[in-house]
Image (cartoon, helix red, strand yellow):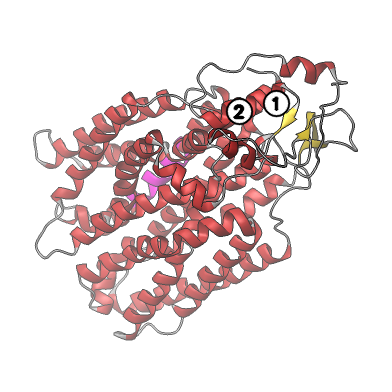
Amino acid sequence: MVKGLYKVAPYSKSTDQPKEFQSDYIQNAYNSKPSSQLGDTVVSFELKALKNGHTRTHQDDTIDLKGGKPNDRTDGEIVDQKEDGQYIEVYGRRWYILVVFSLLTFTQAAVWNTWGPIAVSCEKAFGWDNTIIALLPNWGPIGSLLAGWLSSWSMDVKGIRMCCLLTAALVTVASTIRCFTSEPPYITWTSNIAAFLNGLAGPISMGMPPVLSATWFPPNQRTTSTAIATLCNYGGVAAAFLIDDADVPRIRHQIMVIMYAECGWCFLLMLMVAVYFPSKPPKPPSTTASKERLDIKSGFRKLMRNKMFLQLCLAYGLPVGIVALWGGVLSVDLKSYDVSEAQAGWIGFYSIIAGCFGCLAMARVSDIFSKNIRQILILLYSLAFLDFLWFNLILVDLIPSSLAQIYVSIITGTLLVNATVPLWFEMACEITYPIAEGITTVVMLMWLNTVGLVFLGLQMIPNIGTAWQNWSILGSIAVGIPVLLLMNDSYNRLNIDQMVTGKI
């Protein structure tokens, strides 16, 4: 455990006059000048209050924004005594919490991507057609849209422990249902029901990383911890590609072995969450972690009026949503280009693994160069555009085709797009602070899943083919780049944390 050098007062503390600072370090930190470009009026009020020796509730901020005065002001105070203030501490157990959650999001993603990599085998074994193959992963976006608002409220009100327990239970029940039978047509029903239940766990699985990072990790590790949880989600998708093809008589047996193994693992993971997984540490790891957030209704209204956030959702949701779901049906997409299911499986596996390493690398770069997220995103999207342009030109024979080029272009392009995900999450949380991280990420995921529903829904149109999917990736990135160029940088949350530590 590393003890921080600064303290914040609890919200319940009230006073009429601030006490004198007794720590030269804290005094110097608050005399530092704030960044000139905060991007949010509420944050300017917070920074002003911090320099005056006060912490503020967001109720006070809302009153100030309306031009009124609070009737009963209950500001806390920053002091230099332990009994009057609250130490900010960073606990070593945060890594255990991150590992357990990462295993949970890995498992949920693996259950979601069970069928895509073995689509051709399932067509042989169960008589499934492309409509069923497209519907099964589509339950992920459907379930996420249905559970999105409840998940957002749960993360910000009930805490991460309750949310992770619920997620583990949904994934466990889903994996259990899939063990009932391998006989058609019953397996079609059990697979769809299980996919729907697993989809309900999606908002927590995908949206929790920024919430967990803000709750347990200090500012200089937030993007990295978000990236670790995110790459584990992608790792679960990649794990499904390791399932081998087989002869028809063996397919059902092999699939059931996988179902039993996943079910047993889900029960073990749910037990791990139940035994020890606290919602938050005893003391916060940063100043903003100790502050209240806006409620879900106020937060959503503010999000919908935040032009930068809406631009961010557009630039994030289109490329990331299409690339993620395109990877789930890669074997079907490449079948017409003489790429076997096994080869497509390995391409998908290597693509996602490469994306995981890229995700972590870019997160560390972002934590080191903490106010350059937008510039990093522009670079990654520009390279991704060139890469997928190369891929599409290969498929239309404008560039001599080879399996090696298909491998390299898909792996590199997926790496570049997937590496942006934790950066998008952290950038969104910075732009929208003091809106709760759970609301912000769930709204982003709902837009992402809407894109996914449209993308997978188009696949269900008879005789539509697959070429449009490859060009849609290129087009979505082409939309994202100018949006990023027109956006401004805004680091509301980080400005407050650095203000306290004297880094601004």
Say what secondary structure mark 1 lies in: helix
Image coords of residue 199 (percent x, y)? 42, 65
Image coords of residue 83 (percent x, y)? 90, 38
The residue positioned 58% from the left and 32% from the top of the image is 493
Give the number of marks. Answer: 2
The amino acid on which the numbered mark 2 sits, given as a three-letter code, is Phe
- Between 280 and 34, the one nearer to me in the picture: 34
The residue positioned 36% from the left and 44% from the top of the image is 351
- Between 166 and 86, the one nearer to me in the picture: 86
Residue 50 got which mark? 1
Viewer-side label of 1, 2:
2
State yes or no: residue 32 in magenta: no
Image coords of residue 230 (percent x, y)? 50, 46
| Quadrant including the N terminus | top right
| Dominant secondary structure, magenta | helix
**Disc 1 from disc 2: Cα separation:** 9 Å
Circle 1 packing at 10 Å, graded few (<14), some (14-19), many (20+), is: many
The residue positioned 38% from the left and 37% from the top of the image is 312
Q: Give the labeled residue for mark 2.
A: 45
Circle nearer the N terminus (1, 2): 2
Residue 287 in view, yes or no: yes
**Which portion, as a residue range, is magenta?**
346-358
